[in-house]
Image (cartoon, rainbow, N blue to C red):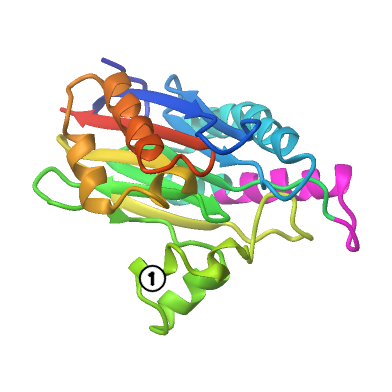
């Protein structure tokens, strides 16, 4: 069981990444920083030569930067200030990657980011791209997607022109409108939700949610008391459904 100063509840967690069955390399990363309640997944953009380097940059940079944010939070204890600091940290990280290896005419480094920071009785999600953050409330049958997909399909869904189910295999789902390494300034989105004992949080790349339905995600998130076993089951399900992409997942269960 894990606890840290700054979060009201105990929690257990695990993370896993897998190459899948179709890719020749793994460009996903899972970031686990339980000592400050920060977790994330990053999916290197497969069409770019340096996708794996981009996701590795996300993992290293965000681990260091969020440690600084956590120290600042211990001083001001404001979730509102912490949320903005989290969002601004992701923006700065993305802009730094663009400056280091990209130009307006040529993008060679890119990745998605979906992260959560546990603070007080809240979970603060920030995303850039189309990796996702879910919340499965204790008494709900289906997880609620907290983040919004920053791709063309996501825009069509929000405009009511495309169903969420149809968006999974729509050609526009691969056309990102925002990502780590995009032309500055990046525009990550932040979402804050209240959480309770018994809730479960899932971060994942499209290698999982793109092939496993949300009702099945809920069943698997409740399939074991062991977070590592849950992650293993989620990865197995994605591979059993074709494993068409790299798979990354972070699972967190909240206790009193």
Position in image of residue 215 (x %, y %): 20, 51
Q: How many marks?
A: 1
**Depth check, front residue: 117 or 149:** 149
Residue 128: tell me if it is visible: yes
Residue 7: tell me if it is visible: no
Q: Is residue 176 magenta?
A: no
Is the magenta region chiefly helix, strand or loop?
helix
Residue 229 found in image quarter: top left
Q: Is residue 90 magenta?
A: yes
Query: Crowdedness of circle 1 by 10 Å Cα count: few (<14), some, many (20+)?
Result: few
Position in image of residue 197 (x %, y %): 16, 35
SS of the residue at dot 1?
helix
Q: Quadrant of the C terminus?
A: top left
Residue at left 46%, top 39%?
243
Position in image of residue 10 (x %, y %): 24, 24
**Placement of 230 over or under 178, stated as above or below:** above
User: Is 25 left, or right, of 231 in this rendering?
Assistant: right
* Residue position marked by numbered label 1 in the rendering: 166
Residue 225 found in image quarter: top left
What residue range appears in magenta?
87-106
**Placement of 48 over or under 29, stated as above or below:** below
């Amino acid at each position: 069981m894990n606890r840290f100063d700054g979060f009201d509840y105990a929690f257990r967690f695990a993370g896993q990444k897998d190459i899948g069955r179709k890719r020749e390399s793994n460009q996903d990363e899972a970031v686990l920083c339980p000592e400050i309640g920060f977790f994330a997944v990053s999916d290197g953009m497969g069409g770019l030569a340096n996708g794996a380097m981009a996701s590795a940059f996300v993992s290293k940079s965000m681990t260091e930067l969020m440690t600084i944010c956590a120290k600042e939070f211990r001083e001001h204890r404001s979730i509102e200030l912490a949320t903005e600091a989290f969002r601004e940290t992701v923006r700065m990280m993305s802009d730094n990657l663009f400056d280091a290896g990209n130009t307006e005419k040529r993008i060679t480094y890119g990745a998605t980011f979906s992260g959560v920071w546990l603070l007080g009785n809240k979970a603060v999600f920030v995303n850039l791209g189309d990796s996702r953050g879910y919340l499965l409330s204790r008494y709900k049958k289906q997880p609620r997607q907290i983040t919004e997909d920053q791709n063309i399909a996501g825009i069509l869904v929000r405009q009511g022109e495309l169903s969420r189910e149809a968006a999974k295999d729509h050609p526009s789902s691969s056309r990102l409108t925002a990502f780590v390494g995009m032309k500055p300034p990046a525009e990550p989105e932040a979402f804050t939700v209240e959480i309770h004992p018994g809730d479960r949080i899932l971060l994942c790349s499209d290698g999982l949610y793109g092939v496993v339905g949300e009702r099945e995600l809920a069943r698997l998130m409740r399939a074991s008391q062991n977070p590592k076993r849950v992650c293993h089951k989620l990865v197995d399900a994605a591979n059993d459904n074709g494993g068409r992409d790299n798979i990354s997942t972070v699972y967190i269960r909240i206790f009193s």
